[in-house]
Each structure stands twice: as C-alpha cells, then as structure tokens.
Amino acid sequence: MLYYNINKPSEKADFRTATLQGLGSDKGLYFPEQIPVFSKDWIGRMEEYADEEIAFSVLRPYVGDSIPEDVLRNIAAETISFDIPLVPVTENIFSLELFHGPTLAFKDVGARFMSRCLGYFMKDNSRPVTVLVATSGDTGGAVANGFFNVEGVRVVILYPSGKVSSVQEMQLTTLGNNITALEVEGSFDDCQTLVKQAFSDRELNKRIFLTSANSINVARWLPQQIYYLLAWKQWKDKSRPPVISVPSGNFGNICAGLLAFHSGLPVKHFIAACNANSVIPDFLTTGEYKSAKAKTTLSNAMDVGNPSNFVRILELFNHQFLPLKEVMSSESISDEATIDTIRATFQNSHYLLDPHGAVGYLALKHFLQIHPGAGIFLETAHPVKFSAVVEPVIGEKIPTPESISGLLYRNKQTVLMQPDYESLKNLLLLSSQ
Ligand SMILES: *Cc1c(COP(=O)(O)O)cnc(C)c1O
C-alpha cells in the first residue's frame, strides 16, 4: 500500500516512510492510495473473531510490507490490550467506552500503535529518533505512556506550565527514563510555536532525527478504525446498523470511522459532535468552509478552530458535498447543554459522562428524535480526567481508578523553561547525546 500527499499527489510513500516523516512536503497529509474492502463474510462473522484478530486484519493492508506479519500481530494485540465495551445507557443509546487504556483516553490506541511501529522501524538504527510533541493535555500523556521504554526512541514533550489538569500533568511527568517533560512558562500556542521552529530548523534536523507524534500521522490515525469494528462486533441487531456519534475536534477519529465505512462497515449515519467550535457544523449547513480561532470550552480536547483531518474526509468523498452530507451530519453543543446532559444522564440513567462524551450523547439524542432508531456515541475520556467539571455537577466525588492512584506517589520530573527557542534547541542537542 502506498500513500499519496494530498497537497501533491505525485509524491508517494510507503507506510514506513509516511510514519517516520509524519507529513509530506508542503505540510500535506498522507492518504491511502486504495481503500481496502472488507468481505461481506468477514463483516457478517465479526462476533466469531478475537479483538486482536480484528485489529490485525484491519491494519494489515495499510501496513503492507513495512512490518512482517508476526510482528504486526503482536503490535496489534498490544495496541488494544484493554477492554472497549459497548454499554447500554438508555433503551436505544449505547456508549462505546474508549477510556479503559493506560491514560484513560482514546488516544492511547493511536499512541500505542505508532510507538510500537516506530520502535520496530528504529530497531536496527544506530541513530535514535526523537519524538517531539506539544500538548494541551491528553496527547502528551498518551504519547508518553505509549513510548515509555521503547528502545531507540526518546520523547520530548512540551506543555504549558499550570495549564493542564493535575491528572494530565502526572501522566506526562512521572515516567522518566526515555520521556522528558519540558514545562514551558507560557501558553500551549508557545509550545506549538517552539515545536514548529524545531521541525523547520535545518541544522538541528541534520544533527538529530526528529519526528512528530501528531494526530495526523498515519500510524496514529489508521488504528482508530478498530473502535468502529469492535462496536459492530458487539452490536446486537445486525439488521439495523447503528448511528454513530463521535465527539470531534481534529476529526481524526471520525475520519477513521468513515474510512472503515468506505471499506464496507455497516453504519447508518455518522454524527460529528462538536462543542462551540463549529467550523464543520457551519460548513455542512452553508457549504462554506470558514476556519476560526479555537474557543475554550469544557470539552477542551475538542477546542480546535481548523480541524487538520477534515481534508482527509473531503478526499474520502472526492470533495463531493452532497454524498458527504448524506453520510455525516454535525451539530455544535454548548457548554450549558453539556453540563445539563451530564447531570440529567447521571440522574436518569445512572451513567456518568465526561464533557466530551456528553457532547456526543446529546448530538445523538437529537438525531434520534428526528430519525427514530438506535445508536452509539463514543465515550472518549474517563470522567475522572475532568473531575473539576464533572464533580460539582453531580455533587459527588468520582472514585480514583487504579491506573491513576499509582501516579500519586511518583515524583514529578520536569525541566522548567522559558518559551525561548535557543533553550529548546540546546536541550534537544544535549538529550540526544
Ligand atoms: C482528542 C480528543 C477528542 C477529539 O478527537 P479528534 O480525533 O481530534 O476529533 C475527543 N475527546 C477526547 C477526550 C480527546 O482527547
């Protein structure tokens, strides 16, 4: 399988190169040249297959010759070595819980898959690779955890001091070893600017092998298809495929779902559930794409003004507006409605939503009011990660899951720095020796 650069289709790369490079020239995203087709028989017998087998089968054609079969089988199994249960919330609404991974957010799947692929690619390389990322919260933890102790890979994470939640900070800063956390005395934008400067610094890139674990990397994007297949495996009424609502920010997750749909996965309809950042809901209403500055909301992992993966969705639909609109709708949900939904769902259904899941739940509920049927929303984070929002709403403390309680006793290890590029460069050169 080859991938082409959306901005320059003549530029092609195999899975290995696309993963190592992250982006093509002119910052273009990679897109698969062919979309594999799932056989009807395979889809019909999904319940008979183990989760690992499903994960392997989906990823195999995308990885191609870049990784041998036995290695890929192991990687696929490790990628989803935790439960992804489909849990009923009401009679016709189900939650696909994606938060049972090590950092309690769905980004674990992509980060685990990418880290293991990179580990394989770097195995015989004398030159270690440095993964450089800026995070506003969730990505950093998932990347740190996914790459922890992967040989030949060191990870440098920049995060804005005092601006991530305490759980998120612990997940970034307590691992040590090949993970370095840089606590930047500035904003998330400062962190991102520093990272971009590093990637465009030719001299630095000659001296160290830098790559990004950004969500647009094909190795983080493609494994997300697994969620949708596991949802189908657990879906009881196979004669009536579900509507699937996806809390969306950068649109990587929903784009993976749409990719699986194009391969033949039965889905009645997709809903891109957004917070106040309404670029895509507005686009689907007006046909006009207007990017905007990101607004801060309670579901902060979706505070994205210009979703990078949307161009992949357009590519998937050959830039045809009407066919896209038939398959996907999108709604913007306010913070007030998010809070009301968390409260009402806790009271009426005894189910605790996090703010992102709440956005997905409400958009699905609205859709089903007009189009009767049944559906699934993706619950993308454990509510404890957003306890400051959720606990006051329900008037109760959320019990601490084991994976977090262990972190409380570890030491925070960070390097404090000013948002200054020369400091970052020196640190990167030092840490690569
Ligand atoms: C990243 C994230 C999202 C948004 O996913 P995209 O693929 O960027 O659309 C939603 N919820 C949570 C909890 C996240 O961390």
Image: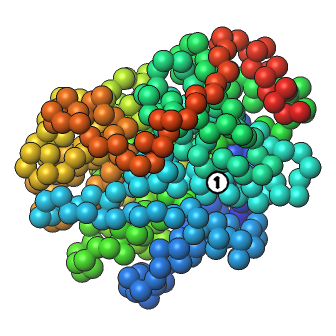
Q: Position of residue 389 (x, y in %)?
A: 27, 30
Q: Is residue 216 shown above or below 207?
A: below
Disc 1 residue type (three-letter): Met
Q: Nearer the viewer, residue 411 or 236?
A: 411
Q: Nearer the viewer, residue 123 or 59?
A: 123
- Looking at the rendered structure, the number of numbered marks drawn on it comes to 1
Image quadrant occupied by the N terminus: bottom right
Answer with the quarter of the image where residue 281 lies.
top left
Task: Please tell me whether mark 1 sits on a helix, a strand or a loop.
Answer: helix
Q: Position of residue 239 (x, y in %)?
A: 24, 80
Image position of 204 (left or right of 135): right
Tell me if residue 181 can be seen: yes
Tell me if residue 36 can be seen: no
Label 1 crowding class (10 Å Cα cut-off): few <14, some 14-19, many 20+? many
Residue at position x 71%, y 71% in the image: 71
- Residue of label 1: 114
Q: Residue furthest left?
A: 348
Residue at position x 30%, y 28% in the image: 388
Answer with the quarter of the image where residue 73 lies.
bottom right
Q: Nearer the viewer, residue 58 or 71?
A: 71
Q: Is residue 230 shown above or below 139?
A: below
Residue at position x 45%, y 48% in the image: 403
